[in-house]
Amino acid sequence: MNIFILKLILAPLIIGSASLAGRKWGPAVSGWIVGMPLTSGPVVFFVALDHGVGFAASSILGVLSGGISLVVYSVTFAWLATRFRWYVALLGSFLFLAITTLFMQSHIFPFVVIAPAVTLAAFFGLKFMPKGDVEPGETQLNRWDIPMRVLIGTSFILLLTGVAPFIGSRLTGLLAMIPLYVSILAVFAHRNHGPAAAAHVQRGLLYGMFAYIGFFIVLNLLIERTSLGVSFGFAVLTALAVQGASLFILRRSR
């Protein structure tokens, strides 16, 4: 099958399924779902198909490094949302995301350093996340919500995998961690239910990040030693196992 057609089939399927599941449950579970490697995983998979496993293996280190930026973004958004309107929280968090991404692009850390570092960052992010009760309000949904997420997510995957050979494997991995979906969820949660709801989305994201970390640790260990099918299969199984455990903890913490 043509790789471009495969991207057009798999990306909307993954993104659409996650969005439907997130709509059924609350803001924290929505963030938890998008914390999984729903964009970064397909990006690395298609990069491996397009440019080889060596390029993909190098991009995995960038993806894991991007997790540091994601934690900084998440905590910044949640705290800014407690004092300011949603657009200030969004702009401020993306500013800190960009600064951290530039730092991680110019400072390369080995896998044995960055894997535990991003795990600790997620733990500390959860510890310092603001707490509060979600305000009652009407959740505004429309029929274009999920189609727009699918369109944005699929377009992003196509664009990033297309420019990957020009920007390099590390920056490809770092940019794969841009929080498109969680930003949409957090903005609508803040507008409809207040800052605590936005913090719940970001807290869910951090819980979901442990599945992403497990996914890419396993993938990094296997991608150059086995086939793509085997390496991604074990990575997905690891992510699902970790995600199940993190959901149990998330439910108990609410």
Image (tube, rainbow, N blue to C red):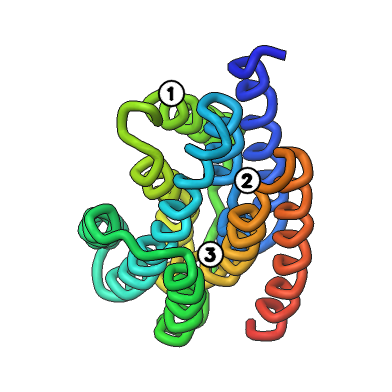
The quadrant the N terminus occupies is: top right
Residue 47 x %, y %:
53, 32
Crowding near pointer 2: few (<14 within 10 Å), some, many (20+)?
A: some
> Image point 61% across, 37% down: which residue?
45
Binning the other alpha carbons within 10 Å of mark 1 as few (below 14), some (14 to 19) or many (20 upward) gives: some
Kindly tell me whether residue 93 is visible in this rendering.
yes
Amino acid at the residue labelled 2: Glu
Q: Residue under circle 2?
A: 224
Question: What residue is drawn where x is 73% and y is 52%?
Answer: 236
Left or right position of 40 against 219: left
Of mark 2 and mark 1, the one earlier in the sequence is 1
Foreground residue among 96 and 25: 96
Which residue in the protein does label 1 denote? Answer: 162
Residue occupied by mark 3: 205
Amino acid type shown at disc 3? Leu
Q: Mark 3 Cα within 10 Å, few/some/many (few <14, many 20+)?
A: many
- Cα–Cα span, label 3 and label 1: 27 Å
Which mark lies nearer to you, 2 or 1?
2
Task: Locate the C terminus and report the quarter of the image it occupies.
Answer: bottom right
> Can residue 92 be seen in the rendering of this structure?
no
Q: Quadrant of residue 6?
A: top right
> In the current view of this chain or complex, which residue is farthest to the top?
2
Residue in the image at 54% along x and 24% along y: 50
Residue nearest the observer in this picture, 19 or 15: 15
